[in-house]
């Protein structure tokens, strides 16, 4: 049985790139799962339900979130489109689930997705708590690092308040205190 633990975002761009390279060389499906996860902020339950029709030749993804029941409509970045195209060129699926299990015509499970992400992280030397939710948290963390207003990130992640989002993406009190210490106007 897999132990559920609190996971962290990936806070190092080098580690993100190492994970992308590792996964891309190993399995394009798993690479796409990672790339789409960190660039969309979708929950794993929503990622795994995506179909080929949802993404093939599309500029946007439109779905109904499983957890909230809310509609979500967002554009795909060039990085995501490229990963989708690379994957679809190498597999013989024209419809059905995007993240197809090797054992049948259904998507990989949440547990399998966890194993993919966690073992890849361990292989490249990441020892932090990493799991499928890391993808969503990494999206929020890097949006914040790039200067996106926390209330926009809150809306993208469907959180109830900005402080929930800050805690969720792992912004620590020390990081907030650094603003006071380093501003020096």
Image (cartoon, helix red, strand yellow):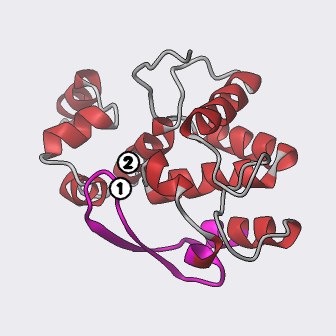
Task: Give the quarter of the figure containing the N terminus.
Answer: top right
> Is 7 placed above or below 67 here?
above
Numbered range of the magenta stretch: 54-82
Please state the total of marks drawn on the protein image.
Answer: 2
Instruction: Please give the label number shown on residue 102.
Output: none
Give the camera-side residue of 146 and 2: 2
Q: Is residue 185 visible?
A: no
Question: Which one is earlier in the sequence, the residue at label 2 or at label 1?
Answer: 1
Q: Is label 1 in a helix, a strand or a loop?
A: loop
Outermost front residue = 104
Where residue 183 appears, as percent x and y from the top left, is 21, 38
Near mark 1 (Cα within 10 A), the count class, few <14, some 14-19 or many ≥20, is few
Question: Residue 54 at what x, y percent from top left?
Answer: 55, 75
Residue corresponding to mark 2: 140
Identify the residue at image location x=37%, y=48%. 140
Q: Locate the C terminus by quadrant.
A: top left
> In the picture provided, is 154 more to the left or to the right than 42?
left
Q: Which residue is mark 1?
A: 66
Helix, strand or loop status at disc 2? helix
Query: In the picture provided, is 90 more to the left or to the right than 28?
Result: right
User: Any magenta on residue 109?
Assistant: no
> Callout 2: 10 Å neighbours few (<14), some, many (20+)?
many
């Amino acid at each position: 049985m897999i132990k559920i633990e609190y996971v962290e975002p990936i806070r190092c761009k080098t580690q993100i790139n190492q994970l992308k390279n590792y996964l891309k060389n190993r399995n394009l499906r798993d690479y796409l799962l990672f790339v789409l996860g960190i660039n969309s902020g979708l929950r794993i339950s929503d990622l795994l339900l995506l179909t080929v029709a949802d993404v093939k030749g599309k500029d946007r993804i439109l779905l109904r979130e499983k957890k909230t029941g809310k509609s979500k409509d967002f554009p795909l970045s060039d990085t995501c489109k490229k990963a989708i195209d690379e994957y679809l060129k190498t597999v013989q699926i024209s419809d059905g689930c995007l993240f197809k299990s090797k054992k049948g015509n259904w998507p990989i499970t949440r547990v399998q997705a966890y194993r993919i992400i966690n073992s890849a992280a361990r292989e490249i030397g990441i020892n932090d708590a990493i799991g499928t939710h890391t993808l969503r948290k990494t999206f929020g963390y890097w949006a914040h690092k790039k200067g996106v207003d926390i209330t926009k990130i809150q809306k993208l992640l469907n959180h109830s308040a900005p402080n929930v989002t800050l805690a969720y993406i792992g912004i620590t009190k020390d990081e907030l205190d650094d603003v006071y210490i380093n501003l020096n106007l």
